[in-house]
Amino acid sequence: MVGSIILTGLLSTLGSLPKELPADLGYRDGNFLAELIDRGVTPLVPIGHERLEKEPSWKRATNNPDHQAKRDHLLKVTQARNATRLASRGRCGANAQRQRTRLEHLFAEAKDHHGLARARGRGLTRVDQQVKLTAATQNLKRLMQSRGWKRAASSAAMLSMRTKTPRICRAKAHRIVLRHLLKRTLAIYHY
């Protein structure tokens, strides 16, 4: 049930379903995995380390359609979990989990260090602005790291020399540069 709601939301958002769907252990439910496979999506859930399940078999045949439907469903769910285990063991599954972990670290950083754990304003517009500003801050940090902190620190030191202040520490120089870049970003978003 929950799986079909998620898939319907994905379909309405993207217009089509992706070929592969990386997810965490919360999505290891066999019904959800079976529904994904029925729709042509390969689920990449990190259950590859688990042993393959034995497919159920029954000694007696049944003439009851309800019992047969339950048996078919159980077999389908088991096959879906086994297919997911095999798919997540490969190189593609490992890459998908690595990317998922990397993204989750970015969200954790946003929550822990940039105040995204709580909404600062009311309404969808304010929350959207807060999320975009947080993402812009994280992108600026990555940009500063890729260009090297030494140049940023030296430019901040040059700014401090103009104002005739004593020598500043490296962390303060970083804060000055980030504050300057953040002011530019705020001006762009009209915040």
Image (cartoon, helix red, strand yellow):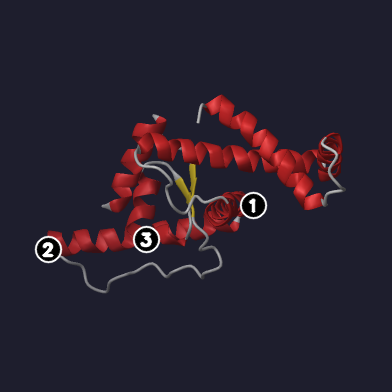
- Which residue is labeled 1 in the image? 91
- Which residue is labeled 2 in the image? 64
Distance (Cα) linking label 2 and label 1: 43 Å
Q: Residue furthest bottom?
A: 59
Callout 1: 10 Å neighbours few (<14), some, many (20+)? few
- Mark 2 lies on a secondary structure that is loop
Q: Indicate the quadrant where residue 146 lies.
A: top right
Callout 3: 10 Å neighbours few (<14), some, many (20+)? some
Please tell me which residue is depicted at 12% across the width and 63% down the height of the picture.
64
Mark identifier at residue 29: 3
Q: Is residue 149 left or right of residue 63?
A: right
Please tell me which residue is depicted at 50% across the width and 31% down the height of the picture.
191
Amino acid type of disc 1? Arg
- The mark that comes first in sequence, 2 or 1, is 2
What is the x, y in percent for residue 124? 36, 37
- The mark that comes first in sequence, 3 or 2, is 3
Q: Is residue 83 above or below residue 55?
A: above
Q: Indicate the quadrant where residue 152 lies.
A: top right
Question: Which is nearer the eye, 141 or 88?
Answer: 141
Distance (Cα) linking label 3 and label 2: 26 Å
State whether residue 17 appears in this view: no
Q: Residue furthest front?
A: 164
Q: Is residue 132 left or right of residue 167?
A: left
- Mark 1 lies on a secondary structure that is helix
Q: Nearer the viewer, mark 3 or mark 1?
A: 3
Callout 2: 10 Å neighbours few (<14), some, many (20+)? few
Amino acid type of disc 3? Asp
Distance (Cα) linking label 3 and label 1: 22 Å
Question: Which is nearer the eye, 134 or 53?
Answer: 134
Q: Nearer the viewer, mark 3 or mark 2?
A: 3
